[in-house]
Amino acid sequence: MVTNLPPVAKQKWNEVTLTRNPEERLRLMGEFLSLVPKHKGTEKLCRQVKRQMAQIRDDQEKQRRQQQARKGSAASYYVQKAGAAQVAVVGPPNVGRSSLLRTVTNSAVEVTDWPFGTTTPTPGMLPYLDIQFQLVEVPPIVEGSSEGRSEGFMNLSCIRNADAVIIVVDISDDPSGNYLMVAEELDNARIFTAKPPGEVEIQKHGHGRDVQFIWEGELDGCTKEEVVALLNEYRIKSALIRVKGKVTLEIVEDSLFGNAVYRPTLVLANKADLGYDHGTVDQLRQAAAPLQVGVCSFQKTRGLQDALGRKLFELLGVVRVYTKEPGQEPAKEPIISRGPITVGELARMIHNDFYERFKYARIWGPSAKFDNEKVGLDRELLDGTVIQLYA
Ligand SMILES: Nc1nc2c(ncn2[C@@H]2O[C@H](COP(=O)(O)OP(=O)(O)O)[C@@H](O)[C@H]2O)c(=O)[nH]1
Ligand SMILES: [Mg+2]
């Protein structure tokens, strides 16, 4: 259900969104909380706002410390992306994240017998077919990470920055309980591991009184008028709203309180070599559904690199397209898309100019009805297609 906030609270939230200054934001958020009636329906919202406040305070503290510390001395938490996708490897302490990176990537990260052995995000590349996935070991997630415990904010923003997530648990150490703990911390940080039925993007305009919709989906259980009325209550009079998938009024209101992201996720239960019973695995599968759960041993399972590469390839819906010049061999390195891609989107990826001046394309391979087929902007490209663009 939508939270049914009183109008004064909605107005206050509008003031919050208009403010960039952190101190001012904190003050207004505090005022907002005092205007929210406390009941079951608003619990989640209050927690979310408190978490945002904690994060602002934490950022301020970090900035203070950074200004004191000499420039460049602090290790960087941000891992530059490389390869087809960045995949965050996350889990509670000691489950084997470092061991996974050592087994399936080129990383020489240290495996330790003590928890919290890895204290900064550490990358490694996993080769698969002719591409590579970048795995990043994120320091442990603990209960309270989403409230800032144990560098929680930094670790969670590192996960948010990735394109996909692998949650690792230890099959011999309460795997469902630990999975649920990690899942809850991610959820609190508004990193969703299951694809939401719908999404809205709201672009606010400073002036005018016009709410426009771009339809890439539909509203579910509410009308356009109700959406406009809800936005009006939050003092949003003029905006561009992109509707994707099936969007409920709750999804619209949720989107006003901070940005949720969806990251495709796999669950790996490690240390299968220690033995386990099937009840434990069933319980984990139930807890993690609809996510896929793999049971393995990072130290003993053979062919782990290839199996994990294949899983990530599927999870991310990777499509490789090879460009070609007339009379020449196709490029060795593919252009990579995560998810379906059309000729037009590919042209835009290469250069906007290509898209603007596009005449037609010729394609070979899985998307072509026959070799050298002439196609337009709308043709969808499947993995392994060779393409020549004419402008
Ligand atoms: N039996 C067994 N132990 C493992 C396996 N993978 C990791 N470990 C052990 O688990 C401990 C933690 O490993 P590490 O990779 O450092 O975990 P991290 O803290 O999640 O990075 C170490 O003592 C490893 O030797 C495995 O597949 N089987
Ligand atoms: Mg480690």
Image: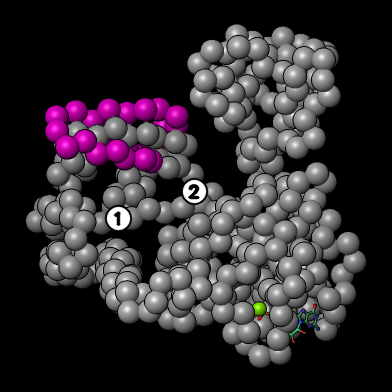
> Is 116 placed above or below 156 here?
below
Which of 52 and 46 lies nearest the eye of the viewer?
A: 52
On the picture, is 72 further left or further right than 129? left
Q: Are marks 1 and 2 in contact (CB under 8 Å)?
A: no
Q: Which mark is residue 58?
A: none
Query: Which residue is denoted by mark 1 in the rendering?
Result: 257
Q: Quadrant of residue 275?
A: bottom right
> Is 131 placed above or below 178 here?
above
Residue at image location 80% in from the left, 50% down from the top: 128
Query: Which residue is denoted by mark 2 in the rendering?
Result: 196
Which of 264 and 331 lies nearest the eye of the viewer?
A: 331
Q: Position of residue 3 (x, y in %)?
A: 25, 56
Q: The disc labelled 1 sits on which kind of residue?
A: Phe
Quarter containing the N terminus: bottom left
Q: The disc labelled 2 sits on which kind of residue?
A: Pro
Element under disc 2: loop
Which of 358 and 249 lies nearest the eye of the viewer?
A: 358
Could you give the CA–CA distance between mark 1 and mark 2, rounded to whole angstroms?
A: 16 Å
Question: Looking at this rendering, what residue extends furthest in the bottom direction?
Answer: 114
> Is 349 placed above or below 318 here?
above
What range of the chain is rendered magenta?
200-228
Q: Where is residue 243 in the image (x, y as percent from the top left)?
A: 39, 34
Q: Quadrant of residue 12?
A: bottom left
On the picture, is 188 further left or further right than 88? left
